Amino acid sequence: MRILFIAPRFHTNQISLVNKLLEEGHQLDIFVMGMGNSEDYRTITPKLIPTSFFTEKYIQYFNKSVDIADFQQFAMPNLCKYYSMIRKFNPDVMVVRGGPEPVYAKCLLPFIFSKIKIVYYTQSPKMVTHVSPLRKVYDYVLSNRYKIKWYTPVLYEVNKRTKLKELAYMDYIPFFIYPAKVEIKERPTDAKINFLCVAKYEPRKNLSMLLDTVAQLHQSHKNFKLTIIGSTGNDKREAFFETMKKDIETKKLTDFITLLKNIPFPQMEEHYQSHHIFLMPSIHEPASVSQLEAMANGLAIICSEDNGTAHYIRDEMNGFLIKANQMELKKAMEKYLLQPELINKHRQGSLKLIQTDFSIEKNYQKLMDIFKSH
């Protein structure tokens, strides 16, 4: 099958999916609006969608430092070149990130009447508390009248899990992930416990709260270390990184907190496997994949409920789900410090979930069912 992905950028949460499709013999191409600094092109290199003359002039004169996340909201493709790229690849299926909302997706409406099957991929939940009448009509027309399929890696939001309504036209397929080759060895109870946090250097990731929590814990617990690995990519994040460095020095935490930035994706497996517990204390997280990567590498997880993929964690089976505040974060971290026997139990739980609930073979079959349906 010839499969074309169209997205703002080639996010690392799509790497295992792409690798699996290539492994199964499919022909792939990826068209993107931009490229980020943490992307991995070892398997496939995406092609940039040419932008229109007016978009280029707007950026040149009014918005030179636009972030890639904002770029997709207004950037208008050069339609002649964009359509020519699509026709040249001649896909059987187009997977469009963001559904019908981004400009590059709206430009694809003429292809609704072609033989190409269009599949929307978004990160909004399948189970929701409310659906507006306008949304019902809008989505019904797309999914029923024009037979556009739709899938999401988010089943429901943990902090909004009461009185849920199912969006029947939307399929749930978790992020694809390959299990790492990892062996969980017995560790003495007096060994150092290594915590890891992976996040962009920005306020909503709650990294400052994490530093304060660690400073408090270190007053009574000396047997742990923390590594924070984050990406910058723009001036604001770079400034936040520098502020973090100064805070660590001011709080005298340099001996047991390591701060790293912009680590290439291929090196991340080594970092995951040198730690025991993964921390995800952020807020307003649409759908993070890093906790799933940590699970695939056999880490126990502490994850905020304010995260679209928090439901990937099974509370007290492979970690703890918490509210994104300092009290709950401290309490969860301290459980591992006081009961180190929980660490291996939860690490084994993570590996079990990767082999069962998040089986890459099971997810692949679900995706193929969508691609082949009429």
Image (spheres, rainbow, N blue to C red):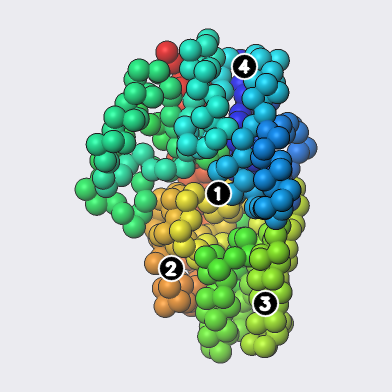
Residue carrying label 4: 91
Label 4: which secondary element: loop
- The CA distance from mark 1 to mark 3 is 26 Å
Residue carrying label 1: 289
The answer to whether marks 4 and 2 mark residues whose Cβ atoms lie closer than 8 Å is no
Callout 4 crowding tier (Cα within 10 Å): few <14, some 14–19, many ≥20:
many
- The CA distance from mark 2 to mark 1 is 18 Å
Please report whichever mark, 3 or 4, sits nearer to the chain's N-terminal start.
Answer: 4
Residue 338 drawn above or below residue 17: below
Classify the position of the N terminus by image quarter.
top right
For this rendering, which residue is in front, 177 or 77?
A: 77
Q: Answer yes or no: is residue 255 visible.
A: yes
For this rendering, which residue is in front, 205 or 318?
A: 205
Q: Residue furthest top?
A: 115
In the rendered image, residue 354, in percent from the top left (x then y), is placed at 52, 43
Quadrant position of residue 55: top right
Residue carrying label 2: 324
Residue carrying label 3: 243
